[in-house]
C-alpha cells in the first residue's frame, strides 16, 4: 500500500486548521501498516522462578527494558515504543508460570492514575514506596520490591533512548532532525524521573508511563488527559514557551503513536479480520468537573478533538463528560467530529452518573474523578480492580417459555421469567465466590495469599495504582481500594419487545394462546409467516417513543437490576449493575431462538440499550425519548445508547449546531451514555469490496471504534445492516 495516497479524513475541511505535512505523512505511514514489520515476538524469558511473584514480575520488567529493541523514528516528537507482539496479543512478555511454563495473560479493562504518576515522577514514586515499605509488615516487602524493580526498569528504558538519540546527533544522516532530537533528549533528562515543568515534558512523561505498561503487556485506559495536561499548556502559552500550533503537533504525535498496534495488515500483507483493530481499551476522558468541583474545559480539550477531526484516528476512543456548564463551543466541536463518522467520540451525562455513584456510597471526591475501564463501564481510576460478567437476558425468557406447559396469565409468565433471572443472579454470585476462593485476597493476612500457580502479581500496573501502593498489595490480588464486578445485562430491549408483543397478541388481541405462540417460536415461525409479518410490522416497539412499549422495558430493567443489585457484595468484591452487550451480538445469536416480536432464530438483536435493529422506525428524537424514560441510577456501571445517523444529515444546514442541541436534550432528559456514529451504507459496501481505498474508514463497533477494513465479513455485514436514522 502506498501510504502517500491515504486520505486520513476526506470529509475534513483542511482550511480551518492543518497539521504539518510531516505529521500527516507520519500518520499515513502508521495507518498503512508500514511499521508492522518492527513488531516481533519476545525471544527471551525470565528464569528466576524461585522469587516471590511480585519481585519476579518487577525483574521481568527490567529484562524487557534491557532486551527489547528500541524503535526510533527521527520525525516523532515523543520517544518510546512497544514493539512486542506478545504485549499486543494480551500476554506478559518474557514471563511464564511454573511448572508448566504457560503464558500469563496481562491486564486490561482498567485505568491507572497517570495524573498521579506524572506529577510524582519516578523519584517521587520511589520515595513514597520506600516510606510505605518501611512501615509495612515483612510479607509485603516483596510487593514493594517489585515496584522498585519496575522503577529501575523504566529508568533503564529511558536511559537507553537517551543514548540512542545522542548517537543520532553524531550521525550526519540525522542532521536535519537535530532540533527535534535535542528537544527529546532534553525532555527525557527530566521526565519521567522528575515532575514535569513544561507541557512537552508532561506529555512525554505521560507517554513514558503509559507506553511502558503497554510494552509490558497491560492495556490500561489513559483517563483524563486534559485535566493533567491543560494547566501545563496554559502556563506555557502564557509564557510564550510554546504556541498553540506547536502543542497541536505534539498531541497529534501522541495520537499517531497510539496506532502502533494497528492490525490492518500483517507484516506479510495478509489481513487479520475480526472484531476490529482499535480495541486495546486505551480510552481517553475529556472535560467534566474535577475532585474540587471545578469544571475542566481547556485548550487540551479542544486540541484533542481538533486532532481527531483531522486525522480520524480511532485507536483512542474518547468520551466527553458533559454537564450544565459545558460550553456551546465544546458541544459544537463534539458534534462536528461525530458528523464525520466513526463513532470515535461519545458522551457521558456527568450529573446523572454522579447521582448513581452517590447511591453506591462512593465518596464525593472519588466519584468526581470517575473514568471508564475500556468501554463505558464506570470506575474510579487508580483505585479500582475491575472485571465484568456479560449476560444475555433473552436466555432466561427462553427458559421461562420452556417451563410453560399450560396457558397462564401474563403476570405468571413474567414471574417465571424473574425466577429464572434470580437463578442467574445466584449463579453469578457463586462464580464470583469461586473466583475469589482461587484468587484470594487480604493484604493484612499473609495466610490468605493464593498459591502462585493461580495468578501472577502485576508490579507494572500496580505502580500506577496509588491504592495498591498504599495497601502493599498488587492489583491482581485486589490491592486496589475497590474491587468491582460489573454485572451487565444484554438484550433487555429484546426481552421487553417480547413481553410487549405477548401482552398485545395473546392477552389483549387474543389472536392465539400463549402455548400456541411458544410452539410457533419453537418452530421458528414456519408456516406462520403472515402472523410473523403482522407482529413485526403493526406493533410499535421500544425506540419509537411509544410510552407503553418503553414502560415495558423500564419494568424489565428495574426488576432485573433490583435482582442483580441484591448480589450486592461477595466478600470484598462490590458488584455494580450495568447494561451492555460488548459487541457480543454475533456470539449471542447462535443461542437465540425466534422471538415473540417477529424475529427468526439466530438473528442479531439489540446492542446495549439500543433498539433492536429493524424495530426503530422513527426519528432520532423518538429513540432518545424512549431511552431516557429509564432510571439510569439503577445501572451505575453504565448503560449506553448507540445512535446511527444517515450520512445525508451532514448536508442539513447547521447540522452541527442541531446535533449539539440533541446533546443538550440528552442531558436534560437524564440520559446516561450516548454513542453517535454517522454512516453511509454505500461507502461501507464500497469499502467492503475494495478495502485498500478506505484504510482509515472508522466505524463504531461497541465500546470501541475500528477501521472497517479490519473487520471480518460477518462483522462488516452486521455494521452495514444496523439502522441509520434519516431524521431528527
Image (cartoon, grey):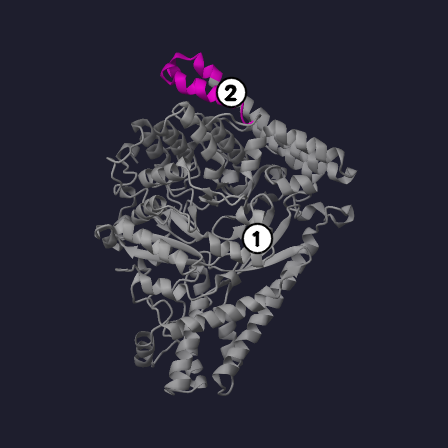
Can see residue 123? yes
189 magenta-colored = yes
What crowding class fits label 1: few (fewer than 14 Cα within 10 Å), some (14-19), or many (20 or more)? some
Q: Quadrant of the N terminus?
A: top left
Residue 49 falls left or right of residue 368: right
Magenta stretch: dominant secondary structure: helix
Where residue 402 appears, as percent x and y from the top left, is 51, 79
What crowding class fits label 2: few (fewer than 14 Cα within 10 Å), some (14-19), or many (20 or more)? many
Residue 230 falls left or right of residue 437: left
Residue with the mark numbered 2: 162
Magenta highlight range: 166-192
Residue that appears at 42% across and 80% down: 502
Q: Nearer the viewer, residue 466 or 272?
A: 466
Residue 696 falls left or right of residue 102: left
Can see residue 48? no
- Looking at the rendered structure, the secondary structure element under dot 1 is strand
* 596 over 480 or under it: above or below: below
3D distance between C-alphas at marks 2 and 1: 38 Å
Q: Nearer the viewer, residue 595 or 464?
A: 464
- Looking at the rendered structure, the secondary structure element under dot 2 is helix
Where residue 121 appears, as percent x and y from the top left, is 58, 29
Q: Nearer the viewer, residue 621 or 260?
A: 621
Q: Residue 387: which disc?
A: 1
Where residue 713 appears, as percent x and y from the top left, is 35, 54
Q: Quadrant of the C terminus?
A: bottom left
Residue 567 falls left or right of residue 246: right
* 265 over 516 or under it: above or below: above
Residue that appears at 27% across and 46% down: 690
Q: Residue 174: which disc?
A: none
Residue 192 figure quarter: top right
Amino acid at each position: 500500500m502506498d501510504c502517500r495516497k491515504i486520505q486520513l479524513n476526506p470529509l475534513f475541511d483542511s482550511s480551518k486548521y492543518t497539521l504539518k505535512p510531516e505529521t500527516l505523512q507520519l500518520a499515513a505511514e502508521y495507518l498503512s501498516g508500514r511499521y508492522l514489520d518492527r513488531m516481533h515476538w519476545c525471544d527471551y524469558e525470565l528464569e528466576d522462578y524461585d522469587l516471590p511473584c511480585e519481585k519476579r514480575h518487577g525483574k521481568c520488567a527490567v529484562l524487557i527494558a534491557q532486551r527489547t529493541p528500541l524503535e526510533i523514528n527521527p520525525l516523532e516528537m515523543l520517544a518510546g515504543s512497544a514493539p512486542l507482539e506478545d504485549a499486543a496479543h494480551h500476554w506478559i512478555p518474557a514471563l511464564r508460570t511454573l511448572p508448566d511454563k504457560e503464558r500469563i495473560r496481562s491486564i486490561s479493562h482498567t485505568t491507572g492514575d497517570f495524573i498521579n504518576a506524572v506529577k510524582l515522577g519516578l523519584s517521587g514514586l520511589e520515595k513514597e514506596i520506600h516510606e510505605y515499605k518501611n512501615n509495612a509488615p515483612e510479607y509485603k516487602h516483596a510487593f514493594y520490591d517489585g515496584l522498585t524493580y519496575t522503577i529501575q526498569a523504566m529508568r533503564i528504558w529511558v536511559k537507553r533512548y537517551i543514548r540512542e538519540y545522542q548517537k543520532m546527533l553524531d550521525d550526519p544522516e540525522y542532521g536535519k532532525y537535530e532540533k527535534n532530537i535535542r528537544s527529546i533528549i532534553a525532555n527525557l533528562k527530566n521526565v519521567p524521573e522528575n515532575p514535569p515543568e513544561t507541557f512537552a515534558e508532561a506529555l512525554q512523561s505521560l507517554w513514558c508511563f503509559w507506553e511502558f505498561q503497554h510494552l509490558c503487556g497491560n492495556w490500561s485506559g489513559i483517563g483524563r488527559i486534559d485535566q493533567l495536561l491543560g494547566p501545563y499548556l496554559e502556563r506555557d502559552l502564557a509564557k510564550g514557551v510554546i504556541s498553540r500550533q506547536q502543542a497541536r503537533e505534539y498531541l497529534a504525535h501522541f495520537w499517531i503513536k497510539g496506532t502502533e498496534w494497528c492490525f490492518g495488515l500483517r507484516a506479510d500483507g495478509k489481513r487479520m479480520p475480526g472484531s476490529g483493530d482499535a480495541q486495546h481499551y486505551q480510552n481517553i476522558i475529556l472535560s467534566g468537573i474535577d475532585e474540587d468541583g471545578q469544571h475542566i474545559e481547556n485548550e487540551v480539550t479542544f486540541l484533542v478533538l481538533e486532532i481527531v477531526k483531522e486525522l480520524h484516528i480511532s485507536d483512542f476512543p474518547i468520551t466527553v463528560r458533559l454537564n450544565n456548564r459545558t460550553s456551546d463551543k465544546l458541544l459544537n466541536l463534539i458534534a462536528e467530529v461525530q458528523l464525520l463518522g466513526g463513532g470515535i467520540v461519545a458522551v457521558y451525562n456527568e450529573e446523572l452518573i454522579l447521582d448513581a455513584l452517590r447511591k453506591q456510597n462512593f465518596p464525593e471526591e472519588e466519584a468526581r474523578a470517575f473514568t471508564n475501564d475500556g468501554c463505558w463501564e464506570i470506575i474510579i481510576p487508580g483505585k479500582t480492580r475491575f472485571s465484568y460478567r456479560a449476560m444475555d437476558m433473552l436466555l432466561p425468557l427462553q427458559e421461562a417459555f420452556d417451563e410453560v406447559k399450560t396457558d397462564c396469565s401474563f403476570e405468571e409468565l413474567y414471574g417465571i421469567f424473574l425466577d429464572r433471572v434470580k437463578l442467574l443472579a445466584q449463579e453469578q454470585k457463586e462464580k464470583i465466590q469461586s473466583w475469589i476462593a482461587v484468587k484470594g485476597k487480604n493484604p493484612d493476612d499473609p495466610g490468605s495469599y493464593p498459591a502462585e500457580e493461580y495468578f501472577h502479581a502485576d508490579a507494572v500496573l500496580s505502580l500506577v495504582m496509588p491504592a495498591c501502593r498504599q495497601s502493599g498489595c498488587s492489583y491482581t490480588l485486589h490491592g486496589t481500594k475497590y474491587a468491582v464486578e460489573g454485572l451487565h445485562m444484554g438484550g433487555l430491549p429484546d426481552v421487553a419487545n417480547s413481553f410487549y408483543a405477548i401482552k398485545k397478541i395473546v392477552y389483549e388481541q387474543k389472536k392465539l394462546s400463549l402455548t400456541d405462540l411458544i410452539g410457533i417460536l419453537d418452530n421458528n415461525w414456519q408456516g406462520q409467516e403472515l402472523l410473523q409479518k403482522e407482529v413485526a410490522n403493526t406493533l410499535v416497539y421500544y425506540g419509537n417513543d411509544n410510552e407503553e412499549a418503553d414502560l415495558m422495558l423500564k419494568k424489565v430493567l428495574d426488576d432485573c437490576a433490583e435482582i442483580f443489585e441484591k448480589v450486592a457484595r461477595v466478600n470484598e468484591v462490590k458488584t455494580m449493575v450495568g447494561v451492555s452487550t460488548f459487541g457480543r451480538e454475533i456470539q449471542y445469536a447462535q443461542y437465540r431462538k425466534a422471538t415473540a416480536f417477529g424475529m427468526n432464530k439466530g438473528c442479531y438483536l439489540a446492542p446495549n440499550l439500543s433498539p433492536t435493529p429493524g424495530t426503530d422506525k422513527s426519528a432520532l428524537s423518538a429513540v432518545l425519548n424512549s431511552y431516557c424514560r429509564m432510571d439510569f441510577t439503577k445501572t451505575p456501571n453504565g448503560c449506553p445508547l448507540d445512535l446511527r445517523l444517515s450520512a445525508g444529515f451532514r448536508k442539513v444546514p447547521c447540522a452541527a449546531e442541531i446535533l449539539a442541541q440533541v446533546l443538550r436534550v440528552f442531558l436534560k432528559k437524564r440520559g446516561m451514555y450516548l454513542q453517535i456514529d454517522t454512516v453511509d451504507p454505500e461507502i461501507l459496501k464500497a469499502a467492503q469490496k475494495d478495502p485498500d481505498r478506505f484504510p482509515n474508514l472508522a466505524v463504531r463497533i461497541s465500546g470501541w471504534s475500528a477501521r472497517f477494513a479490519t473487520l471480518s465479513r460477518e462483522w462488516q455485514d452486521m455494521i452495514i445492516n444496523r439502522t441509520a436514522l434519516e431524521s431528527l
